[in-house]
Image (cartoon, coloured by chain):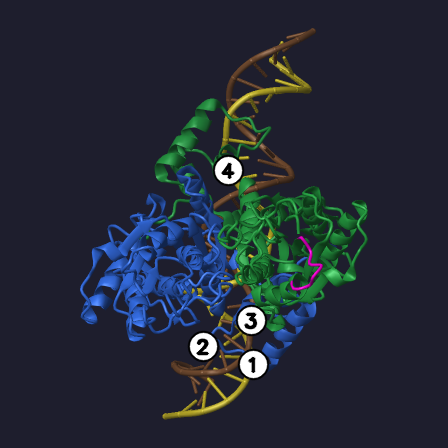
Chain colours: A green, B blue, C brown, D yellow
Amino acid sequence: MAKTPKTSMRDVAAAAGVSVTTVSHVLNDVPGKRITADTRDRVRAVAQELGYRHNHLARGLRLGRSQTLALVSDVIATTPFAGQMVLGAQEAAAKVGWVLMLVNTSRDPALEAREIRSLLERQVDGFLYATMFHRIVEVPELLVDTPTVLLDARSASGSVSSVVPDEVSGGRTAVEELVRHGHRRIGFLTNVDDIPATAGRLEGYRQALAAAGIALDETLVAADTSDSYGGERAARRLLTRTDRPTGIFCFSDRMAMGAYHVAAELGLRIPQDLSVVGFDNQAFVADGLRPELTTLALPHYEMGVWAVEQLLQEMDLAAPVTPSHQSLPCPIVRRSSVGPPGPG
Amino acid sequence: MAKTPKTSMRDVAAAAGVSVTTVSHVLNDVPGKRITADTRDRVRAVAQELGYRHNHLARGLRLGRSQTLALVSDVIATTPFAGQMVLGAQEAAAKVGWVLMLVNTSRDPALEAREIRSLLERQVDGFLYATMFHRIVEVPELLVDTPTVLLDARSASGSVSSVVPDEVSGGRTAVEELVRHGHRRIGFLTNVDDIPATAGRLEGYRQALAAAGIALDETLVAADTSDSYGGERAARRLLTRTDRPTGIFCFSDRMAMGAYHVAAELGLRIPQDLSVVGFDNQAFVADGLRPELTTLALPHYEMGVWAVEQLLQEMDLAAPVTPSHQSLPCPIVRRSSVGPPGPG
DNA sequence: GAGCTCTGGTCAAACGATTTACCAAACCCC
DNA sequence: GGGGTTTGGTAAATCGTTTGACCAGAGCTC
């Protein structure tokens, strides 16, 4: 860890026998500046030799921007797919040479304010305000005059751009998959929480049934907690009926996992006796079940990318932009849990 | 997004009728500076009123450090527990007012070099070099004279500090749990990959057997891929024997999931006929199985915290430090998959 | 009242870039 | 050879802090 004394443009300039200005012009390839190829080469060679490295802090100070984005989220880590969102954002930022600062606020408003303030002091140019599952939030007061995009969240006021999964089309796709295989009695294991995903996927379920000319049977919709135990309970209610559904769409892979347990218990084979579609494409769950679970993937990576690209674009425009709200599709991941309805 | 013109110390100084120096002294609570309470209050009031906000870029430039850490990792997101590590690091940094920049390199050396260079240009003070599962790596040339700590990785040369899970004690703990319940024939579903976790957990398995006075039976160690299919194959090899083990320790929860499938197929009840211990405490897997899986948790959060604290400490000392290598314990998470061996 | 020490500040020089002016020499045209 | 233009740069101000050096006035001592 020998503290190598850092080389600045001044050092390069001195060694190359030119002014700092020239070094700056050369190293930044400033267009429209007339500098002989000879000088250019010399400056570059010297910079290379001295191990010159740009000082982004100094540049940021002068330019008034840091080329840095912040991702602040309520709970970065409690959901296993959070990483994909962060990854998408980070990669999109890296592509244009920006970097991402990461902060987690644990839903603590005081902590959140403190952290945002800290990021603002670091002259962060824009914010991604993310929640780790699709929610309705309001963007913190502190951020009102810094460019901000909502990630996996929508704002009640609609005042800033946002990107969320398209829950409705996701639900529709799931049910269409069952319909396509010939199912007509299709159950829905839904979630009791009042979140956009619940309403959206239910709406998708309705739409798909309607499109297939299947009458909605409210008793085939069973709500419970979104974990595997909720899945068990809800599945048991549906599958112990004499007119049990031949296919079920589950709000989450975890609920689907519960449904698998109940099916095994009742001696129902998947997919011969019962087809199942999940949601989330949860790593190590969907592909660990037997048969592997057909499910819908949340577009976390894509949302991360979209949010950064939108943010960069909004920051480019000096003028205030009209916010744009995007829903990204949830692609279906076909595995082996869906088949034609049994003779039953 | 009205670009509010930023207020600087100069503005505050002018409005308060003092010099910039005084403002700096007051706002930073510089010790040993004599300033009347009256002036202090006035400066603070004015700063508050004008909405003054520190400019960390300018300070960083002056001070030569940014109070920023970078977490560079090979694959941030492909493992669901990665988040815990990032979270631990971020929270430890936040506690002392530092922030974390995040970069993912996808195991691409060219990309890695580019990103590290970019972070270095931003005057990042220290690096966390993380891998998303315990590996042996060498720290990139570029980082040799910037403080760096390895996270979930160890370096071959041992030249920088590192923190990893204690695989040996983890393996031992798992097997001890089975021994404690009275098991004497204990199988090990291990992994074929040549990584520290494989050797470490096997060693732990050996140690626990030896401590219990149980002779090692090599045929009870079945190696396969670490996913659920590998678990199925390995479990089938062990459980179809006439002298099948009464308890098995699985390299991963995913392998344990495979073992559950085989047990169900063979009509073996867990834990009455077979006890199972997993590893990883994988979200939504361990607690989604029936019965819920007893397993070992990887100390990802704690490793993140340790790494940041170590890094901060090493940066404090100007002198070169002798690197410290830490193994953190993997705590057991008891659920319902372990019981006394059956009469069989 | 000369000489000291405090008190409560201020001045100006960094830190390392970018950018707006400006300029000397060379060249061109008639 | 006088005036204008192009070429290839340079000087200096600036971004917003921190900090080491300095200083005027008040109070104390003898």
Check the residue under mark 3 and report the chain it is in.
B
Quarter-of-image position of residue B183: bottom left
Left or right position of A72 against B32: right
**Secondary structure mostly taken by the magenta-highlighted segment of the chain:** loop
Check the residue under mark 2 and report the chain it is in.
B
- How crowded is the residue under tag 2: few (<14 C-alpha within 10 Å), some, or many (20+)? few
Q: Position of residue B208 (x, y in %)?
A: 24, 68
For marks 3 and 1 on the same chain, the one whose residue lies earlier in the sequence? 3
Amino acid type of the residue tagged 3 in the rendering:
Leu
For marks 2 and 3 on the same chain, the one whose residue lies earlier in the sequence? 3
Q: Which residue carries the number 1 mark? A: B36
Check the residue under mark 4 and report the chain it is in.
A
Q: CA distance from mark 3 to mark 1?
A: 14 Å
Amino acid type of the residue tagged 2 in the rendering:
Gly
Q: CA distance from mark 1 to mark 4?
A: 45 Å
Q: CA distance from mark 2 to mark 3?
A: 14 Å
